[in-house]
Image (cartoon, grey):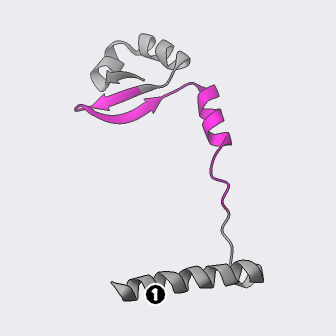
Amino acid sequence: MAQYSTSDLSRKSGDIIAEALRRPVTITQRNKPRLVLLSIEDYRKLTARGDTRKAGRLETMPDALFEDVKKAVSSYEQEGDET
């Protein structure tokens, strides 16, 4: 991935934007990565694959899954007792 500083960004913004349209670009500040500049197409691809997990409530959890969770918690507690 191409890398530019924030100083480069202010001086060469056109070149950096052109590069970011081809592939993601890292923007550094004080030699540390701070930002990634990428095309809208790349951004949409990333967000389309986003987190598909859903939050739920114990009251609505299927019984079989709830039993699995209880077993996992019990197993975790037993491991903690052994240390």
Look at the image and tell me in which quarter the N terminus lies.
Answer: top left
Along the line of sight, the residue nearer the viewer: 78 or 17: 78
Residue 78 lies, with reference to residue 2, above or below; the image says below
The residue stretch that appears in magenta: 26-53
Position in image of residue 54 (x %, y %): 68, 63
Give the quarter of the image for residue 47. Answer: top right
Q: Is residue 52 magenta?
A: yes
Residue 31 lies, with reference to residue 12, above or below; the image says below
Q: Residue at x 76, y 83 (%)?
A: 63
Position in image of residue 44 (x %, y %): 65, 34
The residue carrying mark 1 is: 78
Look at the image and tell me in which quarter the C terminus lies.
Answer: bottom left
Q: Is residue 60 in view?
A: no
21 relative position to 51: left or right: left
Along the line of sight, the residue nearer the viewer: 63 or 30: 63
Q: Is residue 45 in view?
A: yes
Q: Residue at x 46, y 87 (%)?
A: 78
